[in-house]
Image (cartoon, grey):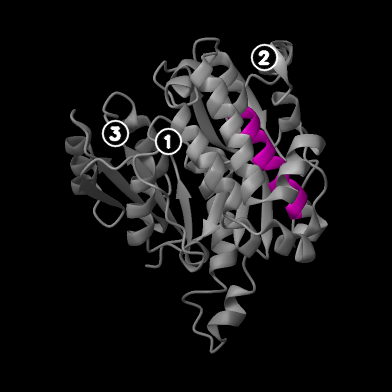
Amino acid sequence: MKKYLSFVVPCYNSQAYMRKCVDSLLAGGDEVEIIIVNDGSTDDTGKIAGEYARRFPGIVRAVQKENGGHGSGVNAGLALAQGIYFKVVDSDDWLDEDAYMDLLSELRTYCGKTAGDGSDMKAETKTALIPDMIVCNYVYNHFYEGTTRSMGYQNVFPRGRLFGWNEIRHFRPSQYLVMHALIFRTELLRAVGLKLPEHTFYVDNLFACQPLPSVKRIRYMDIDLYQYFLGREDQSVNERVLMSRIDQQIRVTKMVSECVDLEAVKRTYPKLAVYLCRNISVMLAISSVHLLLIGTDEAYRKREELWQEIRRMNPMLYYRLRFGTLSGFTYLPGKLGGLLTIGGYRAAKRIYQFQ
């Protein structure tokens, strides 16, 4: 039968927690496929992936490959995906079962218009009846604090119908579209040529940005679907880890800033252009702040080079980021400016609990 949804689960040394992730996805049964990508693990991750593939043929596929990083795992899954929709689930995260069942019910409604209905309707007409992107809420699970925080979009998106970018409302400072919230139509991702860089962390920012201008129809489901685990010391969002990988964060910040033509987007979807600029601003702020936290002369030099490279690539974007968005406050001059920036970052971290 046609798969409604393809999941890719990139795994690297995930033996301690991947079963919870995969087990939560298996609740979808034959209507989904689960592609577990073992990215050159040195523990029993590959063995566990193979075990699932043997136990659940037709649902689980195990891919064994050399290490290439998270983006490489997503690329491998997208190349193999057979589902109408595509979602990435990190191996230490999971889906809420009730929300998952609501999502599948929704997909049955939409996907019945595109596959297996026996009609003579043209393929492009069928595709026009379904969303290009589905957005759901996600939940921060702060493991050691024993707290959770749902991140929704009730104030941003209409509910109960398809809509386009020109119908959205404003995002709050704590809201932005992240990979955990997004489900894309598989063929749209292929059409935009999505290919994430290898051996690089933070590439989920590209996944959540590059396809957006090609999205014409959106469906928002106000359900807490994705359960995002926070608490492992080796997580990429851990402050110490992010500082150690700052060069990769800088690289992805630059890639996101040039992956879409903001002026072209502004002509068709002005509200999306505002959001994309804001998203670049957030990434630039993260890079700037963590370079300040490192505090070395080399880090200050990299911060200056990052800003000046943005200026060379797109002067209009530079001035918008420098003087009209959050990121400008992370580029205040002098040591006092740096101290003010770090103080603001610490306060925001306490309020929004984003790490």
- Relative to the observer, which residue lies in front, 334 or 88? 334
Please state the extent of the stretch shown in magenta in the rendering: 272-287
Q: Quadrant of the C terminus?
A: top right
* Residue 166 circle label: none
Q: Position of residue 303 (x, y in %)?
A: 58, 28
Write the residue at 67% across / 65% down.
Answer: 216
Q: Give the residue number, with chain letter if any, for mark 2.
A: 342
As displayed, is residue 235 above or below residue 253? Answer: above
Query: Is 206 displayed left or right of 15 in the figure?
Result: right
Q: Position of residue 73 (x, y in %)?
A: 34, 46
Please tell me which residue lies in front, 77 or 306. 306
Picture quadrant where residue 68 is located = top left
Which is nearer the N-term, disc 1 or disc 3? Answer: 3
Nearest-to-viewer mark from 1 and 2? 2
Tally of numbered tags:
3
Inter-mark Cα distance, 1 to 3: 13 Å
